[in-house]
Image (cartoon, coloured by chain):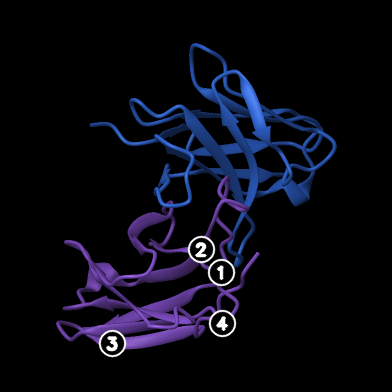
Amino acid sequence: NAGVMQNPRHLVRRRGQEARLRCSPMKGHSHVYWYRQLPEEGLKFMVYLQKENIIDESGMPKERFSAEFPKEGPSILRIQQVVRGDSAAYFCASSAISHPGYEQYFGPGTRLTVT
Amino acid sequence: DAKTTQPNSMESNEEEPVHLPCNHSTISGTDYIHWYRQLPSQGPEYVIHGLTSNVNNRMASLAIAEDRKSSTLILHRATLRDAAVYYCILRDYRTGNQFYFGTGTSLTVIP
């Protein structure tokens, strides 16, 4: 059973470029969550999506960040016009059920470096 | 959201049991207690979770105080691979969409 897959694992972008991070959830999981981890900090929730729908984006910055989870294909976290402060590890998690008594399974992360 | 308090760091000798404490004095009756760990340069890994009763799985045991205001993650025999940051997280229907990760406990295992 493949776990949650994320690519690329490492991404380098210059200031002002766009970054696209991909997440393929575990087989059978239709709930996807994105988190960001700044250096030396804990993970911070960004957005929760079900297929084709954004359910909770309360942790997403208001500008430059967007997320989608199309009917076919991986979930995408898109960061436009990246700045140095966007440098972080971005983790995707998936679950079969969105219920507080169920666990989320995390991917290995994408480490974004903005130069 | 209900907060958790964990020690910043702990040490354990290899092959000895480890008890990682977590205080959650403002826990509500519907909060589940989840534990995750994060090895260096990896994504968080699920360890165990429970609601009211103690729980055991192949990785660890979770002991929940009778008043639920604290819990303890027990690793029965620490190995070098258990060196990680351990997060104690409360989750209920209000925060059901997400996990709130604090700073966790950094566990060092001494060979």
Front residue (pair A58, B38): A58
Badge 1 amino acid: Ser
- Check residue B28 in the rendering and tell me which mark sits there, or answer none: 1
Chain on which label 4 sits: B
- Check residue A20 in the rendering and tell me which mark sits there, or answer none: none
Label 3 and label 2 in one chain: yes
Structural crowding at the residue carrying mark 4, measured as other residues with C-alpha within 10 Å and reported as few (<14), some (14–19) or many (≥20): some
CA–CA distance in space, label 3 to label 4:
26 Å
Identity of the residue drawn at 74% across and 44% down:
A58
Mark 2: secondary structure? loop
Q: Position of residue A41 (x, y in %)?
A: 61, 65
Residue contact between numbered discs 3 and 1, judged by CB atoms under 8 Å: no
Chain on which label 1 sits: B
Closer to the N terminus: mark 3 or mark 1?
A: 3
Mark 4: secondary structure? loop
Label 3 and label 1 in one chain: yes
Mark 1: secondary structure? loop
The colour one sees for chain B in the rendered image is purple
Residue that label 4 marks: B25
Closer to the N terminus: mark 3 or mark 2?
A: 3
Chain on which label 3 sits: B
